[in-house]
Amino acid sequence: MEEKKLDLNSIIGFVLIFGILLFWFYMTKPTPEELEAEKAKQEQVEAETKVQEVPKEEVSTEATTVNLNDSTAVAGYKASVGAFGFTQTKEGISVLENELLYLAISNKGGQVVEARMKNFVNFDSLPVYLVKDGNADFGISFSTNDNRVLNTSQLYFEPSLTKSGENQVLSLKAKVSENQFLEYRYEMKPNDYLVDFTVRSQGLNGIFNNTRPIALEWQMKGRRRGKSVQYENRYTRLTYNHDGGKISKLSESSELDEETEENIKWLSYRQHFFSAILATDEPFKTAGLLSKNLVEEETKEQLFTKEYQSKVPLELKGGELAQNMYWYYGPTDAKVLDDHKELGLVESIPFGWGIFGWINRFIFTPFFNFLSGFLPHGIAIILMTIVVRLALSPVTYKSYLSQAKMKVLKPEITEINEKYKDNAMKKQQETMKLYNKAGVSPMSGCIPAFLQLPIFYALFMFFPTSFALRQKSFLWAEDLSSYDSIFTLPFTIPFYGDHVSLFPILASVAIFFYMMMTTGQSMQMQQQPGMPNMKFIMYLSPVIMLVFFNNYASGLSLYYFISNLITIFIMLAIKNYILDEDKIHAQIQENKKKPKKENRFQRKMREMMEQAEEQKKTGKR
């Protein structure tokens, strides 16, 4: 009977939710006039966009669509590129690959047209591609002395694949003659995601137009890899190292963000757990950067997260190009990026700012990597949580001790409130006097909470960005770096999603009981004017946890659940086995008997309050 009742209640609940949503959609349905106005607005935006769009400078359309089997088209291409028509026009792909990375590099443009991680798959079990199907474009734009504006992305290069020891070397040359050329040189090492990349020219000092700028241009659309595109998009950022080591990021959520920066050491097109990074030996003097947000709402159809663009002016040296760079196509993993300390690529990981990032990077990340080296990742999270909570238990003790003291003083505070209920100034003055005599500070319970904030924030940043958690399962969670789902809803609830995650529910319940223990005394006491409503906060916090974390990494929700559970047990142990309220009461009474010496601040506050009280009495007379 109980199961049938439960099923009926569940059905009624879903029907009510569905009915509320239908009513909400009906009430918010736009009128025909609003639809017509929106249509007119959209047409105006499209018209303005067409007017504002300026095509980038490149070779003619005939060159971009040249049919190499058509001699007339080939002749047209050669005529459009001028001196670079000496290069053999031949379609083709050159492949560089090692145990970790597969790169396909096209003769046309000399650029990477496919970058695939060999040891990773997406949530849907498909291979992880950073570059594929034209989502990236790289080229160098320049002018020639015969007033042609060219871009290497549209030029043909002649490839030559060789070996240098164990390294694979691919040289691609866009030729003016056999001894005059623009070269892209890629060198791939075994078991490494970093590829050396050199751009140089030979004998082109009479070809380049020195009066016009030469610029490196790199565009990319970040490909979606996670179950929740909005969650993934929070950690998809254009990050860069500039001005001697400063790490900055373009906006996470703004529709469009543009910056111009100086002394760029590297540019990272981070796509949550994977990154495409362009680094350089000699910093770029300046760079124009752009990030465009492509995600408007949570949807399974969204294929891309952000669109990145960088434009970097290059300087000629003796009339020639010479820039030593590196491509990194690989995981945003501290263990991997730390292998290239000379470039500082590990700084592209969002550990958090200031002391929070320091704790995350140098304490939590190494500690978790150590634990997960011999334990299942879910158990490693639980063990790390236990260690963190035990380390913070002295702070928890101080907090609970403060609460116990306030509880002992509650009858006397109530008496003061009743006695001076019509005189707020006197009530405040007598309350402070009581605290001072008893040796109790109402702020002593807040200070321990503030001391824990760096730990909590560091862990909040650790779990969503820890590559070690990616696609690691625990209990019902298939991926600790993504949300767990025990039920898929037939509809989407705004701000919540289309699924039910269990770990956030468990964490919310634990938070509720924890706040009952920590704020219960506060709720029993008379609410002070201007103070937050603790009862409201007690009910609001679990709801925020339930809604906000439904699409977050299940590893983070698991941490909060275990953390609050342990804290509850620690507080119960302190209450029942460590603290004795009778002893605390006796100690407070002893403190009252001792003469208390006021410090300068306390004396000043007392004098000000007495002065205000005296003025109040004088005014009444």
Image: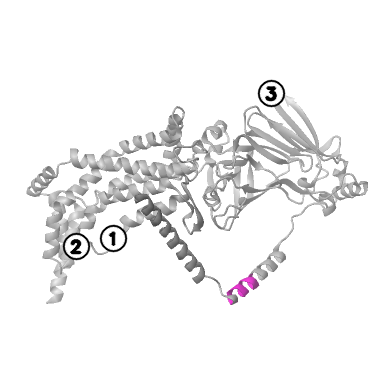
Q: Is residue 202 visible?
A: no
- Measured Cα–Cα span from mark 1 to mark 2: 29 Å
Residue span colored magenta: 33-41
Q: Position of residue 284 (x, y in %)?
A: 64, 44
Front residue of 241 and 566: 566
> Are the residues at dot 1 and dot 2 in contact (C-beta closer than 8 Å)?
no
The magenta stretch spans residue 252: no
Q: Name the outermost residue toward the left.
A: 593
Relative to 281, 561 lies left or right: left
Q: Name the outermost residue toward the top.
A: 165
Task: Kindly identify which residue carries mark 2.
Answer: 608
> Are the residues at dot 3 and dot 1 in contact (C-beta closer than 8 Å)?
no
Front residue of 433 and 406: 406
**Which sits earlier in the primary sequence, circle 1 or circle 2?**
1
Q: What residue is rendered at 55% in x and 33% in y?
A: 336
Callout in the foreground (3, 2): 3
Q: Which mark is residue 166?
A: 3
Callout in the foreground (3, 1): 1
Front residue of 8 and 187: 8
Count residues near mark 3 (Cα–Cα under 10 Å), then give few for <14, some for 14-19, many for 20+: few
Relative to 121, 216 lies left or right: right
The magenta stretch spans residue 36: yes
Q: Which quadrant holds the C terminus?
A: bottom left
Q: Position of residue 26 (x, y in %)?
A: 51, 70
Relative to 529, 590 lies left or right: left
**Which sits earlier in the primary sequence, circle 3 or circle 2?**
3
Task: Kindly identify which residue carries mark 1.
Answer: 533
Asked if residue 409 is positioned above or below residue 376 in the image, the reply reads below
Q: Main secondary structure of the magenta part?
A: helix
Q: Amino acid at mark 2?
A: Met
Q: Amino acid at mark 3?
A: Glu
